[in-house]
Image (cartoon, rainbow, N blue to C red):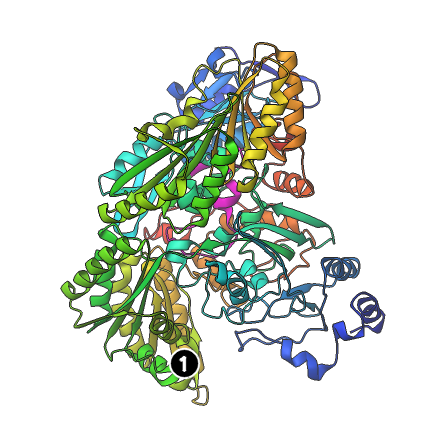
Amino acid sequence: MMPTRASSATGVMVEIPWEELRGIVGDPYLKPADREDAVVGVQPQMVVAPGNENEVAATLKWADQNGLGVVPRGGGTKMDWGNPPIRADLVLSTARLNRVLEHEWADLTVSVEAGVTVEQLQSTLAAHGQRLAIDPLFPERATIGGILSTNDSGTLRLRFGALRDLIIGITIALSDGTIAKSGGKVVKNVAGYDLPKLLTGAFGTLGVITRAVFRLHPLPRLRRSFTFGFESVKQGNELLLAIQASKLAHTALQVRASGEGKCELDVRFAGAETGLDAQSATVRSLAGSGRESGDSMGVWDSLQKLWVDAENCVIAKFSVQPTEIAATCERFKRTTDAGTIGWRAVIQGTGLGWMRLDASDSAALDVVLRDLRNQIQTFVVLRRPATLAEFDVWGATGDSFPLMLALKQQFDPNGTLNRGRFLGGI
Amino acid sequence: MDERILKQFRAIVGDRGVISSPEELHTYECDGLTNFRVMPLAVVLPTSTEEVQGIVRICYRERIPFVSRGSGTGLSGGALPVENGIVISLARMNRILEVDLPNARVVVQPGVINLDVTGRIMSEDYFYAPDPSSQSVCSIGGNVAENSGGAHCLKYGFTTTHVVGLEVVLSDGSIVHLGGKTLDTPGYDLLGVFVGSEGTLGVATQVILRIVKKPECIRTLLAAFDSTNGAGAAVSEIIAAGMLPAAIEMMDNLAIQAAEAAVHANYPACGGLLLVELDGPTTEVETLMDQVDEICRKCGSWEVRVAQTDAERAVVWKGRKAAFAAVGRISPNYIVQDGVIPRTALPRIMDEIVRLSGEAGLRVANVFHAGDGNLHPLVLYDARIDGQEKSAEALATRILELCVEAGGSITGEHGVGEEKKQMMSKMFAEPDLETMQRVRCAFDPLQLSNPTKVFPRTRLCGEKPGRYEPHPLEVAGIAERF
């Protein structure tokens, strides 16, 4: 293969010495990129799959010294999230970092490499009746490094917290080749800065996560789930607040709403038989006029279902206070009423929600999106059709943005990692 | 301190907001870790964010290092003044600003006392979960700095789990907002890295807390064992049975004696006392409590009691929470340690502590959060006896080394502060520490905010990162990088 040419920062064409990288990772693990490897429309040249964290660090250092742009990738399920990269020469795949290193089941912890899929990890943990208490998107393909970097969370967050609350240790490779760890293998630990939290949700812009350690929870004994239907989101929101203010020990709670005006509330419990009976009675009495539907266990992948046949849709994540859920849906309704735009949303009891906009008219979609982005403080567009006008999908920056820039400067001064993809063009 | 600068401080906080006479400054020369003392140049007591900003701006302009201080109950010297620096006391910023029950949020100033948050919302059946033993006096701002834990963090998580937003004055005087009332603000999780940064990244001036609904039922069980190992075996069985108690605490004989002497908790006299608290829906708690009871008896407990009323529970907890101070009743001096081990290493480490204690000829009382492996060995000594303080320090250090070797941590909730900064090199390799310091350089490039704490040495923010050297424990094959 011929060395590929790239323009350096000075505008002079220079040759990229790919053979050096081949020397670091071994011949079979450096391949030309194809169209499937494009990142939000930007075509990289090569895909590299380092075999261990030393190779990850060496790859990053090499890329950094050669002025290349690197895009880390796990299962590739969320590569269309974020802004287009300013520079993407090389995709760094963590596919070969695929070992569950230590499942210390008696200590309820696990140490795992970044390229392990969520499903692979959960099935290992289930052998000892345990789990990582998360239910993120696309578990069969999504990797630990990927869900951490994108801060993905699902319905269990209400009870067990987000990934930031479950991760207890991390190893990262920085663009200068440093390998650093923070946190540890014990749940309780305040020694040094909490880099596991800093790296969670950093969208791969500070370093590449190579390992993580998590605290675990026992698998639930029994589960029971209920769905109540309402004529308005307002009623659903009221029940959601009533359940939150009750002494029920629910493990998931969500409201589903759509442009058609109706609304469903789903609530799930886990525990022993007797406890479940008592809680079932309580939640039914709270639900009042809500129509209980029969089978409710199937509703918990509603979030992932937003992604089905969504090529030409907008999918956004938003965050509001639980008391604002109905008003937020009302806003969706008002904004979309004028045109031919359909919407549906899944909103958790935490106030985190995901919504999808379906429209054939991209000009109308532009207008709706602009309104929603202006009106809802945290409104991050995860998926959008290529026909839409460019905008920062993360929304406006706040007064802490200069600090974020300073952090990026400290961790990745040359902008090697995922440059341009994060908030404010970080 | 230079009268010119004192005058500037007074212009912001008034005459009564500045302390500069040596007699009054003595109060501030240490925190809960009393064997380290440094006299500050002055103590400034702001009452608002704007006043904090004004003070910090002066510090920035004049390059004066500052240490923020809440109630001064910290046990690692985090609020210890630094040479030629001032102390910013947040004690007068003690208002609860907002209570929002439907959204489970409370907004407070940093000087608010931990227990007062729960006090304000308990009539509505809510509580603020992090409960360090000092909760009746320690401040929320201090909890944020140290990422304080407490007995109930086994189930509910630490301060960092319960702080959702902060207003912070950075060392250059700028005001930033991290997180907020809603979750997942886009951008880096600066909130996550700020909580627990021990005052080194800035001064928190407003805190948004998450509060929790009180569970339907709370039951506390006491079980007496012949030894801590028997109690430890019961803990393992409880966890293996798939339970997540709200708290699991353990005390050894010496700690029980001390607690009895101080607060008469009416604990059974035994070698290892286990305290297990379960909470949740009543029927569930009652079923699980029966299982815990059975497990304890199976593991050799000869007396199991369940606290029947809130008053009984309160007495049980009072003994546990008073344990540190109570040790003062049985020893003139003592060192409190805060090491963490993987819980399964408990029997081995306990045996080792007993052996080391015998070798050193010093008594060690053990109080610990058994559910999460957080040990609090209290090394007892008499400072009047020549050389005993030194051997007590050596023993305490050795115990922490044991924790690190077992794959644990040098501190579970007290912080590194001044006390354990040299121990950081035993737990982390140079690139780990250097990487953490990059965060510091982004927040506080001049290193004015609580400098010289946490890290074994200060990194100049222009300094080039060093080359990777294998960690001593890695070379020895004891630890892996994680």
**Nearer to us in this view, A135 or B388:** A135
Asked whether residue A384 is in view, the answer is yes
- Tell me where residue B98 sits by quadrant: bottom right
Q: Specify whether A337 is left or right of B369.
A: right
Amino acid beneath label 1? Ala
Q: Is residue B334 above or below residue A422?
A: below
Instruction: Tell me where residue A20 appears, x and y as whole percent.
Output: 49, 23
Residue shown at 43% from the left, 44% from the top? A243
Q: Up-down: is A324 above or below B139?
A: above
Considering depth in this image, is B359 or B114 the residue closer to the camera?
B114
How many residues crowd around disc 1 within 10 Å: few (fewer than 14), some, or many (20 or more)? many
Look at 60% across and 70% down and name the residue there: B80
Q: Residue at x 40, y 39 (%)?
A: A287
Residue B204 screen position, x and y as percent? 63, 57
**Residue picked out by circle 1:** B326
A38 drawn magenta: no
The residue positioned 64% from the left and 28% from the top of the image is A373
Quarter occupied by the N terminus of chain B:
bottom right
Q: Is residue A167 visible?
A: no
Q: Nearer the viewer, residue A391 or B93?
A: B93
Residue stretch in magenta: A182-210
B316 lies left or right of B389: left
SS for tag 1? helix
Q: Position of residue B134 (x, y in %)?
A: 48, 70
